[in-house]
């Protein structure tokens, strides 16, 4: 397909040169208006993969292409306007308000000496509305619950107005209500044409929202493709080594195991 | 609903901006009054009309009080701004600007000059500044050599090690110093004082201080972004390593320049950022100018007390430590719980 915005081309990466690499020749493409779920057991290198997609870690071999150009050639602020990441959690030692925190997402759109103006405030406020926590705008970050914090980090990423959104375990701290909301948000972003790449442990979330799936397991070649072809009982059994079944209940597919 | 929240946020920013202007006005007023406060001709306020009649009063004000007040002002501003930068970057509210080997380096340089070199004020100042910067450079070089931990942790560890080395050196110098002449001088320097400030000594420190404060003010919002984790700051389009280095140099070099003329004046750089954050919130866009203004007010007020309360001069470092520690205790125990609707 020609509309691939982010492309991994035979990426090999490890943290230590004297150890075997964690990622070996990983190739896949992320398309505008599609959601790619990265699925695999703990330690398979999913978070590492996101850090490489962000340009933060450089592959040993292979290349990451962003919109047809190697990501390492992008100026840092341009990269910040293209790509945003929502980390699993973030340490905040000081009492920022939620709005002040989300405003930091405007940094790639401002010059290094810039100060956010009224337009940036509007964009940050809109991002808070999109994730449904506009009412918390003036609350101090440390008073938020884990789930609210995760939604705030998502709002900060949206304030960057990226074309590619990287989500690291976005549902990890969320209750059922917020999980359903997150799925709705991701669908809405997809409809707006964003390319979304998320790591996820929850088959329900993957089945509900992913168009494409990248399956990873330590010591096995990564496998990618459309969700219905890749995210199968056989593949899940192989990477998790559990007797997993995919069943349909009320028109929605779930994974169960015994 | 969100329009209201947006208006509320913008209104709060406007309030904080007005408060900053009020602080600036207060600082200017305090400075003007301080020029007349002292122990000449008697303890208290010098009537301003005497400046026109009394030649001695005029010379006293222009040659002694004004350079000294400017030094107090710049010292307070520099230490507070540097404290805010380091606390933000290290994500640790207990870091102070002399950290990273700077204070102990300056102390060693001053003691070294007093014991081995001719102990004129200018030589002491130059030696203190040189060793303060050497302390910073050594900490930085050591941090680059360390092979574990994140960048921040490595700097912290290197700073602790370098400070310990220099403080051992100060101990050694005190031990071999002449107890009748040199030791008292070292001790007085370590307590911190602005008693020997003159125009030339102040002007030596001025370029570094003005350049540093200007850079920090210009980067006041960016500092927020750079206080986040390295990867997050990177994802927000910054070059965290390079930009943090600029901030640290802009904070620590003026600190070294000021410590070199004032001696070790503790607690200002620790406590003022706390006060600024308490009043203005964590956003350093307001926190930075607030820390600079409050630091100036705090140091000028303390120095007024230092030179007026007793017939002999009270070392400034003792007053700032006393007041700073009391305020710190107050802030920590009176932790208000913000009511949330």
Image (cartoon, grey):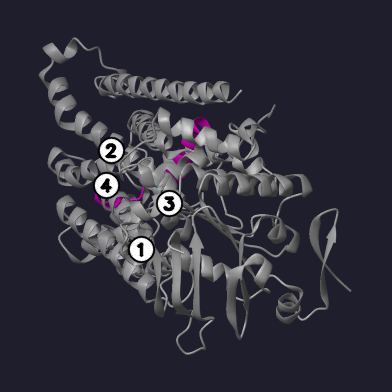
B263 in the magenta segment: yes
Q: Is residue B136 visible?
A: yes
Report how far apart the C-alphas of labels 4 and 1 lie in the structure.
Answer: 52 Å
The tag on residue A68 is 1
Q: Which residues are magenta?
A: B255-281
CB within 8 Å, label 3 to label 4: no
B114 in the magenta segment: no
The tag on residue A193 is none
Q: Earlier in the sequence, mark 3 or mark 4?
A: 3
CB within 8 Å, label 4 to label 2: yes
Do discs 1 and 3 belong to a common subunit?
A: no
Mark 3: which secondary structure? loop
Q: Which chain does tag 2 point to?
A: B
Q: Write down the residue under mark 4.
A: B258
Residue found at the far right of this picture: A258
Q: Main secondary structure of the magenta part?
A: helix
Report how far apart the C-alphas of labels 4 and 2 lie in the structure.
Answer: 8 Å
Do discs 3 and 4 belong to a common subunit?
A: yes
CB within 8 Å, label 1 to label 2: no
Q: Residues within 10 Å of mark 2 (few under 14, many from 20)?
A: many
A198 or A67, nearer to the observer: A67
B116 or B205, nearer to the observer: B205
Q: Which chain does tag 4 point to?
A: B
Mark 1: which secondary structure? loop
On the image, which quarter does residue B314 sit in?
top left
Number of callouts:
4
Q: Write down the residue under mark 3.
A: B236
């Amino acid at each position: 397909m020609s509309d691939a915005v982010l492309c991994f081309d035979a990426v090999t990466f490890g943290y230590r040169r004297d150890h075997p690499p964690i990622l070996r020749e990983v190739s896949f493409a992320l398309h505008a208006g599609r959601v790619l779920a990265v699925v695999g057991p703990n330690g398979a290198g999913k978070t590492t993969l996101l850090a490489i997609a962000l340009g933060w870690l450089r592959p040993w071999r292979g290349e990451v292409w962003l919109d047809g150009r190697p990501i390492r050639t992008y100026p840092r602020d341009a990269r910040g306007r293209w790509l945003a990441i929502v980390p699993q959690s973030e340490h905040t030692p000081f009492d920022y308000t939620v709005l002040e925190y989300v405003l930091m997402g405007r940094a790639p759109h401002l010059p290094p000496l810039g100060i956010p103006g009224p337009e940036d405030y509007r964009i940050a406020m809109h991002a808070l509305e999109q994730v449904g926590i506009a009412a918390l705008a003036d609350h101090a970050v440390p008073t938020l619950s884990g789930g609210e914090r995760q939604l705030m980090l998502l709002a900060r990423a949206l304030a960057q107005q990226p074309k590619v959104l990287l989500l690291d375990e976005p549902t990890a701290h969320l209750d059922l209500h917020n999980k359903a909301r997150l799925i709705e948000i991701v669908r809405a972003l997809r409809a707006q044409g964003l390319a979304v790449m998320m790591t996820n442990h929850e088959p329900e979330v993957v089945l509900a929202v992913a168009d494409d799936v990248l399956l990873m397991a330590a010591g096995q070649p990564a496998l990618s493709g459309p969700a219905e072809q890749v995210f199968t009982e056989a593949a899940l059994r192989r990477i998790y080594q559990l007797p997993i079944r995919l069943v349909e209940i009320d028109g929605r597919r779930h994974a169960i195991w015994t | 609903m969100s329009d209201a929240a947006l208006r509320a946020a913008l209104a709060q920013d406007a309030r904080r901006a007005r408060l900053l202007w009020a602080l600036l006005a207060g600082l200017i007023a305090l400075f003007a009054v301080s020029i007349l406060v002292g122990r000449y001709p008697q303890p208290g306020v010098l009537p301003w009309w005497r400046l026109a009649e009394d030649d001695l009063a005029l010379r006293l004000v222009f040659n002694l009080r004004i350079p000294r007040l400017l030094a107090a002002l710049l010292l307070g501003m520099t230490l507070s701004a540097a404290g805010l930068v380091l606390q933000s970057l290290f994500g640790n509210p207990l870091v102070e600007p002399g950290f990273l080997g700077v204070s102990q380096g300056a102390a060693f340089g001053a003691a070294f000059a007093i014991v081995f070199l001719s102990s004129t004020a200018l030589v002491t100042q130059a030696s203190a500044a040189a060793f303060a910067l050497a302390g910073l450079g050594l900490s930085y070089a050591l941090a680059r050599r360390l092979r574990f931990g994140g960048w921040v942790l490595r700097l912290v560890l290197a700073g602790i090690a370098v400070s310990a080395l220099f403080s051992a050196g100060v101990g050694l110098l005190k031990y071999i110093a002449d107890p009748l002449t040199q030791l008292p001088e070292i001790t007085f320097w370590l307590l911190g004082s602005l008693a020997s400030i003159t125009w030339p000594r102040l002007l030596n420190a001025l370029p570094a201080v003005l350049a540093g404060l200007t850079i920090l003010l210009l980067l006041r919002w960016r500092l927020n972004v750079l206080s986040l984790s390295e990867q997050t700051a990177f994802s927000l389009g910054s070059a965290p390593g390079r930009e943090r280095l600029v901030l640290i140099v802009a904070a620590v070099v003026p600190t070294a320049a000021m410590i070199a003329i004032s001696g070790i004046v503790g607690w200002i750089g620790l406590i003022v950022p706390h006060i600024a954050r308490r009043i203005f919130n964590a956003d350093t866009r307001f926190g930075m100018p607030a820390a600079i203004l409050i630091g100036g007010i705090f140091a000028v007020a303390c120095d007024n007390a230092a030179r007026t309360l007793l017939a002999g001069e009270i070392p400034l470092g003792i007053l700032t430590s006393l007041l700073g520690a009391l305020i710190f205790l107050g802030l920590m125990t009176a932790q208000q719980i913000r009511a949330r609707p």
